[in-house]
Image (tube, rainbow, N blue to C red):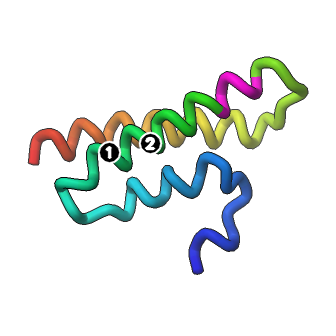
Amino acid sequence: MLHEDIKYPKWQKPYLEALMEFDRNALSKKIAVAEAAVSHRSRELTTIAWDIDEHHALRDAAFRLHLFKGRSAKG
C-alpha cells in the first residue's frame, strides 16, 4: 500500500489521503485535516533540531494543498 513507504507518515498520510479523495463531500474535510497536520508538524520543527528535507517537504505540501483547495472550490 502507498502509506507503507512514506517518509513522514505523521503528516504525509493525511496529505496523501486529501490528494487522492474523489468524493467532493469528503474533500474539504480531508484538506482541512491535512492542512492541520502539516501546520502542526511545521510548528513542532521550530522547537527541535529539524530535518531540512522534511522542512522542504512540508513547505511543498502546504503550497500544494493551498492550490488543491483553490481548484476544488472552483469545481
Q: Within 10 angstroms of label 2, few (less than 14), some, or many (20 or more) residues?
A: some
Question: Residues under labels 2 and 1: Cα distance?
Answer: 6 Å
Task: Give left or right: position of 37 versus 20.
Answer: right
Q: Quadrant of residue 59?
A: top right
Q: Residue furthest left?
A: 75
Q: Is residue 58 above or below residue 75?
A: above
Q: Determine whether the residue tagged by mark 1 lies in a helix, strand or loop.
A: helix
The magenta-colored residue range is 41-45
Residue type at numbered disc 1: Lys
Q: Is residue 17 above or below residue 1?
A: above
The residue identified by callout 1 is: 29
Residue 32 percent location from the top left of the image: 38, 38
Which one is in front, 44 or 65?
Answer: 44
Q: Nearer the viewer, residue 35 or 75?
A: 35
Residue at the spot of label 2: 33
Q: Residue at x 37, y 44 (%)?
A: 31
Q: Amino acid at mark 2?
A: Val
Magenta stretch holds residue 53: no
Q: Is the residue marked by circle 1 packed among few (<14), some (14-19), or many (20+) residues within 10 Å?
A: few
* Quadrant in the picture for the N terminus: bottom right
Q: Secondary structure at mark 2?
A: helix
Q: Position of residue 10 (x, y in %)?
A: 66, 49
Is disc 2 in contact with disc 1, using a CB cutoff of under 8 Å? yes
Q: In which quarter of the view is residue 56 placed? A: top right
The residue located at (49%, 51%) in the rendering is 15
Residue at the right extreme of this rendering: 49
